[in-house]
Amino acid sequence: MSGRVRLARLTDLAALGELSRLCQQDNVDARSLGLPVMGRRIGVFSLFRLPLGAFRPNDLLFVYEDERRISGLLRVERDASRDEWTIVELDAIGAGDSGETRFRLVQHLLRDGAKRGAIRFHVACSDGQGNPELFMQAGFARYGQELLLFRGTDKPLPQPWSDEQTRAAGIRPCQPLDALPLARLYSSVTPQPVARLESYRLADWERQGANTLIPRSSLAPILRFAEMESYIQLDPNDGAGGVAALLQLGVAREEQPHYLKVLARPDVDASPLVDFGLGLLAARIGRGGSCPDNGVLAPVRTYESPINRRLEEAGFAGLDTVTLLMKEAVVRVAEPALVPAVR
C-alpha cells in the first residue's frame, strides 16, 4: 500500500463524516469497531456529530490517505491524568485493503503514543470484522467482555424518588472522602488480574462525578458529552461507612442515549439503585425539557452478574457483547518491599 497516515485537518470533516457513515452499514468493503448503539451500529464520530474543532486538545484523529482519498480514520481520546489512550473509532473502506489500512493506523498510533509517553492503550470492539485478531496482532491482550444493555423510550421511566426514600435506602451523592470505600468495593467485585491491569489509584476514585471514566467501560466516550453524577449506596451492616454499590448516571444533552453504570457486590440487591437512577433521569428529562429522552445505555461486565438481571427486570434488553483489550507500553517491575531476615 502506497498511502500514508497523517493527522486529520478541518478540511477532512466532510470526508470523515461520510467514511464513518459508510462503515456502519452492512458493507463488506468496510470495517469498524462495531459498537452497537440504539439497536443499530453507529460510529462514535457520527453519534456525536461534532466538528473536529470541537474536540478537546487531548484528542487525536488520524486518517489514512492514498492518492488524495481518505480511506481510513482512527480517533483516540487521551486521559492526561493517567497517560492512557482509548481508541473510540477505527474505520476503513476498500475491498481487500480495509484490514491493512486499519493495521497501519493502529501501528502509527502506538508509535506516536510511545513518543508522547502513553502508558496504556484501551479499545472495546465487537468480535466481528476481525477486530480482536487485529488488535492482538498489534500486541493488545483481551482482559474482559462487557454486555451492552439498552432501555428504549417505549417504556416510561419510574417516578423520581423522594428525599425520604433516598435516605431510607442509604443512597447519597459521592464525595472525595469516599475514594477508599469505593476502591474496596471495586476490589471486591473485580478479578485480581483485571484490577492489576486497570491499576486505579485513590486519586482516580476521588474524581467521581467530574466526567470521570472510573470505572472504565466500553461506552466511556459517551461520558465526556454528558453531565455526570455519581451516587453510592451505604452498607447498612457496616457502621464504618462501607459502600455496598455505586451508581454513575450520564445525562445526555444532545441526540444520544443516556448512560447508567452500576457497580455492586454480588450479595447486594442492585434493584433499588437502578430504580433510583432511572427516577433521577426522569427528573432531569422533565426539568424544562432540556434533556432529550433517547433511551438509556448500560454496560455490565460479565463478571459483574447478577447486575444484568436487575437491569433486565427494570426494562433493559441486551444489544451485544463486546471485547475489552489493552496494551501496556511500559514494563511492570516488582515494587520494593521489606522481607523478614533470618540471622
Image (cartoon, rainbow, N blue to C red):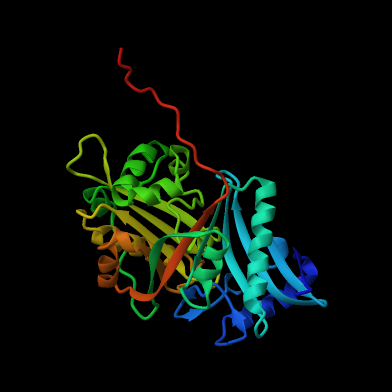
Looking at the image, residue 244 lies above or below residue 152: above
Residue sticking out furthest to the left: 237
Query: Which quadrant would the N terminus be assigned to in this image?
Result: bottom right
The residue at the point 23 percent across, 51 percent down is 169
Which x, y percent locates residue 261? 38, 59
The residue at the point 19 percent across, 44 percent down is 236
Which x, y percent locates residue 52? 71, 65
Residue 110 visible here: yes
Is 144 positioned to the left or the right of 116 in the image?
Answer: left
Residue sticking out furthest to the top: 343
The residue at the point 73 percent across, 62 percent down is 53
**Quadrant location of residue 30?**
bottom right
The residue at the point 24 percent across, 34 percent down is 240
Residue sticking out furthest to the right: 67
Pick whichever, 203 or 69, lies toward us.
69
Residue 45 visible here: no
Pick whichever, 191 or 307, lies toward us.
191
Is 240 positioned to the left or the right of 122 in the image?
Answer: left
Pick whichever, 108 or 146, lies toward us.
108
How many marks do you count on the picture?
Answer: 0
Is 99 positioned to the left or the right of 146 in the image?
Answer: right
Which x, y percent locates residue 115? 70, 48
Which x, y percent locates residue 297? 42, 69
Query: Which quadrant would the C terminus be assigned to in this image?
Result: top left
